[in-house]
Amino acid sequence: MSARSAKAGQNLGGKLYLAGDGAIRDKETGYFTITGRIDDVLNVSGHRLGTMEIESALVANAMVAEAAVVGRPDETTGEVVVAFVVLKGPRPEGDAAEKIASELRAWVGKEIGPIAKPKEIRFGENLPKTRSGKIMRRLLRSLAAGDEITQDVSTLENPAILDQLR
């Protein structure tokens, strides 16, 4: 069974356990390099992009405290990149938000390449997380697609953040 066809958290025949994160082991040193979540890959115009790489590029910018990236279905490109960003300063609105979003798109384009630039960047005071601190990506995917949130949100630390990120 390939990693793609298996679900994260699945016991594979009693010999392997797929945790949902990819890694490569160096034959010489024995050290592992984490390559990211295997189930979070976007297909943008035929290019496979890892959400972890785009998130890392965003948080490498001095203005950004935290970021989460999801894909939104698109008729032209297959998927577009949608980024949810928490800045180190106050949450921008209006023209200030557009200016910072443009700067962050250019930043990602420089760090990774033009194909990885987020089509949409939404700013929030924080991200939807469980009380244990895990980002609820399924909710972000619903927000990015413009869907109504029908999933259980009882485990959210701050349910009001969903309205802010719409």
Image (cartoon, rainbow, N blue to C red):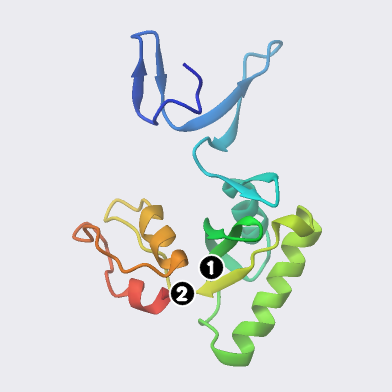
Q: Judge the density around disc 1: few (<14), some (14-19), many (≥20) Cα neighbours within 10 Å.
A: many
Report x, y in % for residue 162.
34, 71
Q: Quadrant of the C terminus?
A: bottom left
Q: Nearer the viewer, residue 28 or 111?
A: 111
Report x, y in % for residue 130.
29, 55
The amino acid at mark 1 is Val
Q: To which residue does mark 1 refer? A: 85
Q: Which quadrant of the structure image shows residue 28?
A: top right
Q: Give the residue at the far bottom of this rendering.
A: 95
The residue shown at (64%, 53%) is 54
Task: Answer left or right for 38 relative to 16.
Answer: right
Contact (Cβ within 8 Å) of mark 1 with mark 2: yes
Compared with 42, 80 (above or below) is below
Task: Answer left or right for 125 relative to 81.
Answer: left
As helix, strand or loop, the secondary structure at mark 2 comes to loop
Report x, y in % for residue 140.
42, 61
Q: Nearer the viewer, residue 149 or 154?
A: 149
Q: Earlier in the sequence, mark 1 or mark 2?
A: 1
The residue shown at (74%, 56%) is 115
The residue shown at (79%, 55%) is 113
Q: Which quadrant of the structure image shows residue 99?
A: bottom right
Q: To which residue does mark 2 refer? A: 124
The amino acid at mark 2 is Gly
The residue shown at (39%, 78%) is 164
Compared with 28, 7 (above or below) is below
